[in-house]
Amino acid sequence: MIKSLLKHPVFKNFLALSTLQIINLILPFVTLPYLARVLGVSNYGVVVMVYSVMQLLFVVNDYGFNLSATKEISAHRNDLGKVNTIFSSIMITKVIMLVISFLILLVLLNTVDVLRNNQIAYLMGFGMVLGQSFTPVWLFQGMERMKYITLANLLSKGSFTALIFVFISQAEHYIYVPLLYSIGFTLAGVMSMILAFKEFGIMFKWPGFNNVIMQIKKSAQYFYSRAAISAYTTANNFIVGVVLGEYFAGLFGVAEKLYQAMVLIYTPLSDAMYPHMVKKKDLNMFKKVFVGVILLNLVVASGVFIFSDTIVHFVFGQGYDESASLLRYFCILAIIIVPTIFIGYPMLGAFGFEKHANYSVVIASIVHFVIILFFHSDLTIYNMVILLIFTQCIVFSLRGHGVYLLIKERAGKQTK
């Protein structure tokens, strides 16, 4: 049974995606205690703000292709001509989105005071968006060959992790941190493209205007979903920085990074299951995995809740006491978000209920921002996490309704 598990494509892709997720989070996380101590709370807050803005631009540039293209590549993986057409159409779209992303950044730098004060840091950080644009995770995931892109990320992002310890030695060096991040992301993009051409025989060709438009249309609902998710997750650090300042962005960022470490494995496991569920509709496997991750998440969240003060002080040192208190709220959020993730695309998306998965986050994000709009004057870092918990409950409820409809539909088919 163990040998069968190790050979299963879902396990292999989960292992590769988990490693990729660990690289993307842990390698920067290795540097965070060092940066938090060397830069201080406010300068570290600037770094957090730069990364938050780039993550928002990631969403614009990705345009939902990590879901739509993964599904399409998975369906046509044995047809190289079709794969080339999909790949070329998406890369043309990404170049367009890259230009749009840069224009959005320029507007933000000239309209938001907090960003205007550190324009060079944000411009240096835009290389992260460039590198992310040319890292076709969706291609490797659809081909179920994630080990290649994982290796590329390990080598490139390991390099910028080392560079931080070499070049960042005092608080004034905070402005160079985004540049080093950009170098890592760009190297990952270059290596990923080389591997795509070498391992899969990918060849760029003009796909025709109609194919480009078709890919944009196909991915639109996925983009709305991902944009909505980022609107009430990634955007929160940005909002905290704009409303409360970079010092509080630093405190919020520390707690959020530890929260992200708590839920590290669940998104790659969900992503690894998605192409398998699309093809096999394997509900038995889904149920086993779902129960397992719920139990594991409860144990981890409970442990972090109890030892939050010790964890924050050990990892980040002095000056981040409020982050420890904030982390306890994030533990509650973790308990809600994990089942919400798994009833989304591995389940609802695979069975044709994408709209329930997508529109749940669109509706929740609208509620989230309406509340912020009307109560921003009373905003605190604690209120922000409480609002996140409330928003995630909305997503869970709406997706739960989608699961109910799915079960009802399947029961009706079995009766017939």
Image (tube, helix red, strand yellow):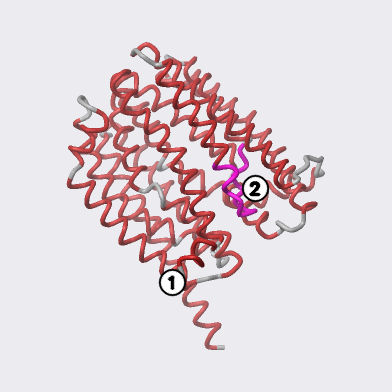
- Find residue 139 and name its label: 2
Residue 268 as seen in the image, left or right of residue 379: right
Residue 289 as seen in the image, left or right of residue 376: right
Look at the numbered discs 2 and 1 and tell me whether their residues touch, using CB distance below 8 Å. Answer: no
Q: Badge 1, how many Cα within 10 Å: few under 14, some, many 20+? A: few
Q: Residue furthest bottom?
A: 416
Which residue shows up at 31% across the image and 24% down it? Answer: 36
Residue tagged 1: 404
Judge whether residue 149 is colored magenta: yes
N-term-proximal mark, 2 vs 1: 2
SS assignment at label 1 = helix
Tell me where residue 212 sits by quadrant.
top right
Magenta-highlighted residues: 135-150
Give the answer, above or below, for where 398 lies relative to 44: below
Residue 107 as seen in the image, left or right of residue 29: right
Tell me where residue 293 sits by quadrant.
bottom left
- Is residue 87 or residue 141 the one in the foreground? 141
Tell me where residue 126 sits by quadrant.
top right
Q: Position of residue 403 (x, y in %)?
A: 45, 68
